[in-house]
Amino acid sequence: MINYAINNLVLPKKINFINSRITDKVSHFLFFLNGMIVIGVLVGIFILLVFSAIPAFKEIKILEFLFGLEWNPTSYVEEKFGIVPMLVSTFMVTLGSLCIAVPIGIGTAAYLSDVANGRTREFVKPIVEMLAAIPSVVIGFLGIVLVGPFIAKIFNVPNGLNAVNGSILLAVMALPTIISISEDALISVPKAYEQASLALGATKWQTVIQVKVPAALSGIIAACMLGMGRAIGETMTVLMATGCAPAMPKSFLGPVSTLTSTIAIELGEVAYNTKHYYALFAIGLVLFFITFLINLVSEIVLHKYEQVHR
Amino acid sequence: MDIKIRADKFNFFYNETMALKNISMNIFKNTVVGIIGPSGCGKSTFLRSINRMNDVIFGARHEGDILIDGENIYDKDIDVVGIRRRIGMVFQKSNPFPKSIFDNVAYGLKINGIKDRSYIAQKVEKSLQDAALWNEVKDRLSKSAFDLSGGQQQRLCIARALAVEPEVLLMDEPASALDPTATLKIEELIHELKSKYSIIIVTHNMQQAARISDYTAFFMMGELLEYDITSKVFTKPSKKITEDYITGRFG
């Protein structure tokens, strides 16, 4: 009788064990496949970019491309393929947007996590996140009809379609990311740090700045990097709001044309398989390297930071 | 003896729950007061009332007064930050900041506006010495505080609290997460610190309370049932329930 009971207990277990091993292997394979698809897409894009860009360098010198100060691919006199104006434009607009978005973003995150009461936070945070849902073309539109005239009036320039306009709009677009992720990072700082700081006679403000922000720094850096990635990669808004003059930018109040907006504008009109066509892919490759570099640097920064602070 | 802290008919509520009922007690200068009692009896709440750490809890309110050197810490015009600076606290679970050992101890000085580097360095060394940690960490002050063992981390937290020269030290079960050796070190430390500070220590460990405290307070259900010289509480308690608790018949 006892033997019978034991056998009955053991038998189904064995079958389950085999079953679970099979499902384990199948699901393992499926997840592996998913990971491979992502890597495959990434490698595929990279290869496509490289092979589309290579022909450009048969006719354009790489140094001339990277350090040339003029971009004039359709000139009848002498075609110029220098991307420095675009690099500078992209740098200006990105830097400008970060200068606006990072302080406001971290400030808002600190307000939401440490100053606002529960009800205010529940009200404000979804609204901030909804900001991310506004299509970039709508933001670009606002840039033309709202921010542009405003800038023109304040700085007394003929029109407001310039780097400042682009910076402001990109800041608006980067803010939800920066606020949301920074706030999550601040919220997840252990309460014990806050208590220790307060018990030592620190004010709430000191606690946030000197204990919570450093403790959440990895998340905050990640937030800013993601915001920066958004600013560099964003196309439609800058295309609409920055004036798109491919000349070397003279000031923040002059029109600029970023890497992205140049590709977007010119790729639609360029003749297939020409020097110009390949040059645009080369710009795409440069853009790819820039974002890759930013991700790499932020990973290294994060890693170093975590080693020190854990 | 001089009274350092005086609780006067102090009641404390979390929303509608009454956590402390009519607590009146005097705590003298340069003594160690052990607070014992079963879990949820209000020991920690009372401790946290003394440096107003309960303020941050939503729905917390109080009645009655707590005075330090005759000054009501619940006075409307009082500076809470100043009160907390005068009353140091060591928590149950060691909670060093994710900073270097040096920066952990220097933090309290820096937030109080001290910028003189050599003074800060001196003070950090002195505090670590007072917390009996200096010899173990003097060669690695710039290393992360998380590299220390649990007992060392707790002594670091004590050093951090000492650096701002508090008048009173509140300790909420400071040794409950430590092994016997580390516990012994903390107890020896408390004994030495007594000459400079008034210390109030919450503990679940009867032997510990008997060993280190001059006075013992027995809390139960939010009430202060017994408060007297430790030897008296442990040998001739005035209430039967205190004796039952101390001898381990419940709790």
Image (cartoon, rainbow, N blue to C red):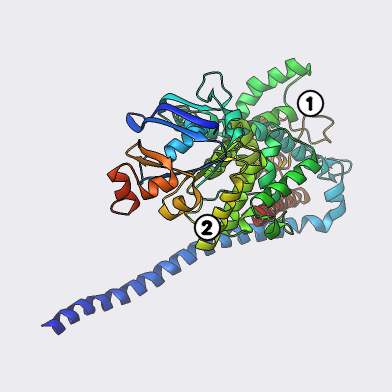
Q: Residues within 10 Å of mark 1 (few under 14, many from 20)?
A: many
Are discs 1 and 2 located on one and the same chain? no
Is residue A202 something that shows in the picture? yes
A142 relative to A151 in the view: left or right: left
Q: Quadrant of the N terminus of chain B?
A: top right
In the image, is residue A68 above or below residue B13?
below
- Labels 1 & 2 near each other (Cβ < 8 A): no
Q: Distance of mark 1 from mark 2, alpha carbons?
A: 66 Å
Q: Position of residue B103 (x, y in %)?
A: 69, 46
Residue type pointed to by label 1: Leu
Please name whichever residue, A253 or A76, is drawn nearer the observer in this view of the structure: A253
Q: Position of residue A147 (x, y in %)?
A: 66, 22
In which image quadrant can residue A86 be found?
top right
Please name whichever residue, B81 or A144, is drawn nearer the observer in this view of the structure: B81
Q: How many marks?
A: 2
Q: Residues within 10 Å of mark 2 (few under 14, many from 20)?
A: some
In the image, is residue A28 above or below residue A223?
below
Q: Position of residue B136 (x, y in %)?
A: 68, 60
A84 relative to A272 in the view: left or right: right
Give SS at disc 2.
Answer: helix
In the image, is residue A153 above or below residue B187?
above
A207 relative to A124 in the view: left or right: right
Residue position for label 2: B183
Residue position for label 1: A253
In which image quadrant can residue B196 be found?
top right
Please name whichever residue, A223 or A151, is drawn nearer the observer in this view of the structure: A223
- The label nearer to you, 1 versus 2, is 2
Q: Position of residue B233 (x, y in %)?
A: 39, 45
Residue at 54% x, 53% y: name it: B187
